[in-house]
């Protein structure tokens, strides 16, 4: 059994045990969904652009069962919360969408699975006008929280997969990803794009998902990282971030302003050759936000081409250029992320960049398999020298997306 399989079993056992504790019966099944690392393409998703994420071995498991009473209630419990939360299914439409600035109606952790139940019910009701049985959901996860590895998309993916099956709503994976995003945007109140949910639903072993966020067309791009003698090191700075507040929404607003000034529906429609004109039309900050998105979209396309033509060993410079653009133009990096990237590169990584929404969370480095320890030690030493909290360092292999486990 590999390390990740051991973790998976532990997480499954924890979810099942919590379900039994909550309900006194066995669940109808276990469903799980992974976190993700984005290889390249940051903040491009809500600009209708391109992204290239992959699913990681860390997963959230939902142990779920239909309720045998006829009270139409949904109850959620989680190993990281003290108390379960219970509401009537019919009440979900009063709870969500959450009004901006209002006191949250349920604790944030519960808004993810309850938001999924709400959004799935609405999506399915639009299609078939179904009635739904009450449900119990118990959640356990080994996806680090607040690390920029999409612990939230993992909860959404596991819950959506379970409810889709138990409620026989028959939505496909893309529709379930949309349900997850709706929960995130309208129940939790984080104005994110759809990358994380798509990565968590569609992930494949040893491959990344090349996603066009306008059409939602997805292509599986083999990575061949291990075959090339390489590994991907995740460097969690342990600086927590939250996308429901502050910088993320501001960046999104700047992008929307940039698109408006350029007279296009989204920055996806601006190309690198339009940048001189953009620079004349907008203030410096908006221009730099726009330049990040436009060049990042191009870097995703270049990375896919280089992966197909030359393999993983050749993408290092694109990863570094992406980090520089996020640090200097989009301004979403923090000193800990820059330190992780710089130290990894100085210790011989082929490429490195922060991954996810920024303002904390994790960076990744592409390293020779036999240099994982050297690079990890160098990053840990650089953090200690700067007086930062010790980072969490672990390798991530591209893994399978959401599925039923048992
Ligand atoms: C977060 C969001 C995603 C995406 C990334 C940045 O992970 O959830 O939708 O915008 O940030 O690429």
Image (tube, helix red, strand yellow):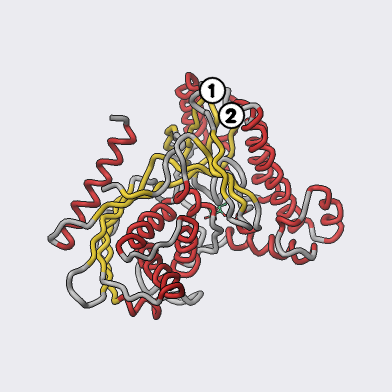
The reply to whether discs 1 and 2 touch (Cβ–Cβ < 8 Å) is yes
Among numbered discs 1 and 2, the one appearing first in the sequence: 1
Examine the rendering and report whether any part of residue 237 can be seen.
Answer: yes
Q: Which residue is mark 1?
A: 228
Q: Quadrant of the N terminus?
A: top left
Residue 72: % across, % down: 26, 76
Q: Position of residue 81 (x, y in %)?
A: 28, 59
Can you give x and y, in whole percent of width and height, for residue 110 in the image? Answer: 34, 64
Answer few, some or many: residues within 10 Å of disc 1's Cα (few below 14, many 20 plus, some between 14 and 19).
few
Q: In the rendering, at what x and y percent does residue 311 appear?
A: 60, 28
- Would you identify the image quadrant in which residue 289 lies? bottom right
Q: Indicate which disc residue 333 carries.
A: none
* 278 vs 304: above or below: below
What secondary structure is marked by label 1? loop
Q: Secondary structure at mark 2?
A: helix
Could you tell me which residue is drawn at 25 percent across and 42 percent down?
Answer: 10
- Look at 56% across and 38% down and name the residue there: 221
Whether the residue under disc 2 has CB within 8 Å of ligand 1: no
Q: Which mark is residue 312?
A: 2
The answer to whether 392 is drawn above or below residue 228 in the figure is below
Alpha carbons under labels 1 and 2: distance apart: 7 Å
**In terms of depth relative to the viewer, which is nearer, 404 or 233?**
404
- Figure quadrant of residue 137: bottom left
């Amino acid at each position: 059994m590999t390390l990740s399989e051991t973790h998976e079993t532990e997480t499954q056992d924890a979810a099942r045990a919590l379900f039994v504790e909550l309900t006194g019966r066995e669940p109808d099944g276990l469903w799980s969904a992974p976190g993700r690392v984005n290889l390249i393409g940051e903040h491009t998703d809500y600009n209708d652009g391109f992204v290239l994420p992959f699913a990681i071995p860390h997963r959230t498991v939902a142990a779920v069962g239909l309720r045998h009473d006829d009270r139409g209630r949904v109850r959620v419990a989680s190993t990281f919360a003290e108390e379960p939360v219970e509401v009537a299914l019919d009440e979900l439409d009063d709870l969500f969408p959450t009004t901006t600035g209002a006191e949250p109606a349920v604790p944030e952790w519960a808004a993810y699975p309850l938001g999924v139940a709400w959004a799935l019910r609405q999506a399915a009701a639009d299609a078939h006008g179904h009635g739904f049985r009450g449900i119990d959901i118990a959640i356990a996860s080994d996806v680090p929280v607040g690390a920029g590895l999409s612990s939230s998309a993992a909860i959404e993916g596991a819950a959506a997969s379970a409810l889709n099956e138990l409620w026989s709503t028959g939505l496909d994976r893309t529709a379930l990803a949309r349900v997850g995003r709706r929960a995130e945007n309208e129940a939790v109140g984080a104005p994110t794009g759809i990358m994380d949910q798509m990565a968590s639903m569609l992930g494949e072993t040893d491959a990344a998902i090349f996603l066009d966020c306008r059409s939602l067309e997805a292509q599986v791009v083999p990575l061949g990282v291990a075959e090339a003698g390489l590994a991907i090191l995740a460097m969690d700075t342990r600086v927590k971030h939250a996308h429901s507040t502050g910088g993320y929404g501001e960046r999104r607003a700047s992008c929307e302003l940039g698109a408006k000034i350029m007279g296009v529906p989204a920055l996806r429609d601006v190309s690198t050759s339009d940048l001189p004109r953009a620079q004349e039309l907008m203030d410096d900050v908006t221009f730099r936000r726009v330049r990040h998105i436009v060049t990042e979209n191009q870097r995703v396309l270049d990375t896919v081409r280089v992966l197909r033509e030359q393999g993983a060993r050749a993408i290092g410079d694109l990863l570094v250029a992406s980090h520089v653009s996020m640090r200097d133009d989009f301004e979403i990096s923090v000193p800990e992320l820059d330190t992780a990237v710089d130290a990894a590169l100085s210790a011989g990584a082929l490429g490195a960049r922060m991954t996810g929404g920024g303002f904390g969370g994790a960076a990744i480095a592409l390293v020779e398999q036999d240099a994982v320890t050297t690079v990890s030690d160098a990053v840990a030493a650089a953090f200690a020298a700067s007086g930062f909290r010790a980072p969490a360092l672990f390798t991530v292999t591209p893994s399978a997306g959401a599925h039923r486990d048992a």
